[in-house]
């Protein structure tokens, strides 16, 4: 963050972020956003699986993201956890036709197999993320790295690895950061779920994309020009000055300001 800002300017920025956070952290935000996919369910494992797949597809046009994620839910008979645990290879055949940008049918079937491994061995996807992070960790980076390694232990084509971002390779890991925001942040506003307890909101990192990156730079929260993991850590640290316990709540404000052309 630009340390040359006056106290008055910092207070104005804080007020702006708080105001826009409260404006966009509302249930009427859900319908037009990929988070609407996990909101179709109430069972914890269904929310996790639907959220993870929706987040994985979350690049490009939001209407297309939602449409394609709904297609996956339909092929899972609107019961993601039951399908993942019990499905056969024959039931994977429709997924071979799936295409979302560069995510294709082979990627989809790999994801089904990797998720089946997770839920055959664990009650929740949360367990895999938790195994990679301690309460003392400053950020979720080690959890992301551990989850990626575990997920990729399922046989797959090398092309599928690009759909699981790697912060150790400097990726911003926007989609994984967004997924963890959904699972970890409290549900007070009705958008996020707050169904995971081990990872703390203070450890979350901003889902950095074109919109949030541009707005963060305009507001002086981010100096780095690349949207990489270093930038994620820089902007998240800046946001902690306004709310150390829940810095990523301002994702609502930054995304809303950007996508609605306010900045």
Image (cartoon, grey):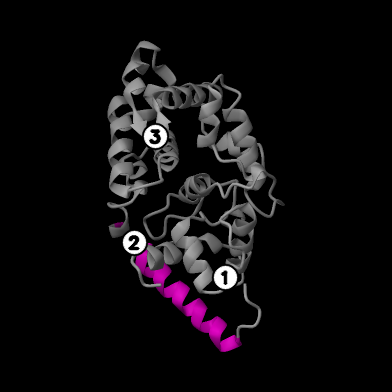
Magenta segment's dominant SS is helix
The residue closer to the viewer here, 159 or 120, is 159
| Residue 221 image label | 1
Badge 1: residue crowd in 10 Å (few <14, some 14–19, many ≥20): many
Which of labels 2 and 1 is toward the front?
A: 1
Q: Earlier in the sequence, mark 2 or mark 1?
A: 2
Residue 133 percent coordinates (x, y):
67, 43
| Residue 46 image label | 3
Q: Earlier in the sequence, mark 1 or mark 3?
A: 3
The part of the image, by quadrant, that contains residue 72 is top left
* Disc 2 to disc 3, C-alpha distance: 22 Å
The part of the image, by quadrant, that contains residue 79 is top left
Secondary structure of the residue carrying numbered label 2: loop
Residue 60 percent coordinates (x, y):
37, 47
Instruction: Name the residue: 42% across, 55% down.
Output: 187
Residue 230 position (above or below residue 102): below
Q: Does 263 sit left or right of 222 as displayed? A: left
> Pointers 2 and 3 in contact (CB under 8 A)?
no
- The answer to whether residue 105 is magenta is no
Q: What stretch of residues is rendered in magenta? A: 6-27
| Residue 26 image label | 2
The residue closer to the viewer here, 130 or 232, is 232
Residue 217 percent coordinates (x, y):
53, 69
Q: Earlier in the sequence, mark 2 or mark 3?
A: 2
């Amino acid at each position: 963050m630009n340390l040359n800002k006056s106290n008055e300017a910092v207070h104005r920025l804080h007020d702006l972020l708080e105001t826009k956070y409260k404006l966009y952290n509302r249930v009427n935000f859900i319908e037009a956003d990929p988070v609407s996919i996990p909101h179709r369910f109430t069972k914890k494992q269904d929310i996790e699986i639907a959220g993870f797949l929706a987040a994985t597809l979350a690049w490009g046009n939001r209407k297309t993201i939602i449409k394609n994620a709904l297609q996956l839910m339909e092929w899972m008979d609107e019961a993601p956890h039951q399908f993942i645990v019990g499905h056969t290879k024959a039931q994977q055949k429709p997924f071979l036709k799936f295409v979302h940008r560069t995510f294709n049918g082979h990627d989809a079937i790999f994801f089904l197999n990797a998720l089946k491994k997770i839920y055959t061995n664990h009650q929740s996807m949360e367990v895999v993320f938790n195994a990679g992070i301690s309460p003392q960790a400053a950020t979720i980076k080690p959890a992301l790295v551990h989850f990626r390694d575990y997920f990729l232990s399922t046989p797959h084509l090398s092309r599928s690895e690009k759909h699981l971002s790697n912060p150790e390779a400097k990726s911003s890991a926007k989609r994984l950061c967004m997924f963890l925001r959904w699972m970890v942040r409290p549900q007070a506003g009705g958008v996020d779920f707050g169904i995971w307890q081990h990872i703390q909101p203070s450890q979350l990192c901003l889902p950095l994309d074109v919109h949030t990156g541009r707005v963060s730079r305009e507001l002086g929260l981010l100096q780095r020009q690349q949207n990489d993991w270093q930038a994620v850590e820089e902007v998240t640290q800046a946001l902690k000055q306004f709310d150390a316990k829940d810095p990523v709540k301002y994702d609502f404000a930054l995304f809303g300001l950007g996508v609605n052309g306010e900045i």
